[in-house]
Amino acid sequence: MIKRYKGEFTPIEVSREMGVTNKTIINRLSVLVKNGFVEPLLVNQRIRSYELSDFSRDNEKKIKKMIS
């Protein structure tokens, strides 16, 4: 995600790209939210999309190096 999505993204976009179910992506995103890597964007008290956190943007090079 950090390589492709600099702005806002939806679980459906990510699930299609990765070839897994929407539910799988939502579960993984909840872990990333807990750990401060992504932030949910709320619309009428529901999460509609996500964006990378300031931490993820600030440490993008370090994160990419660790996962490569």
Image (cartoon, rainbow, N blue to C red):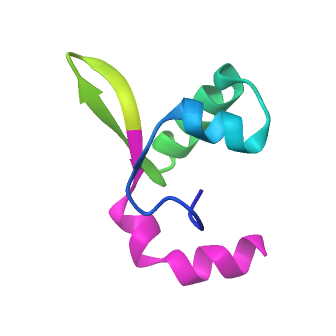
Left or right placement of residue 16 versus residue 39 in this view: right
Left or right placement of residue 16 versus residue 36 in this view: right
The residue sitting at 57% across, 30% down in the picture is 12
Magenta span of residues: 50-68
The residue sitting at 45% across, 49% down in the picture is 38
Q: How many marks?
A: 0
Q: Which is more toward the observer, 15 or 65?
A: 15
Residue 11 position by quadrant: top right
Residue 39 position by quadrant: top left
The quarter in which the C terminus is drawn is bottom right
Residue at the left extreme of this rendering: 44
Measured as percent of width and height from the top left, residue 57 is found at: 41, 70
Give the vertical position of 32 relative to 27 (above or below).
below
Q: Is residue 62 magenta?
A: yes
Left or right placement of residue 65 versus residue 33 in this view: right
Measured as percent of width and height from the top left, residue 36 is found at: 44, 52
Residue 15 position by quadrant: top right
Q: Is residue 51 magenta?
A: yes
Q: Which is more toward the observer, 47 or 18?
A: 18
Give the vertical position of 16 relative to 48 (above or below).
below
Measured as percent of width and height from the top left, residue 22 is found at: 65, 24
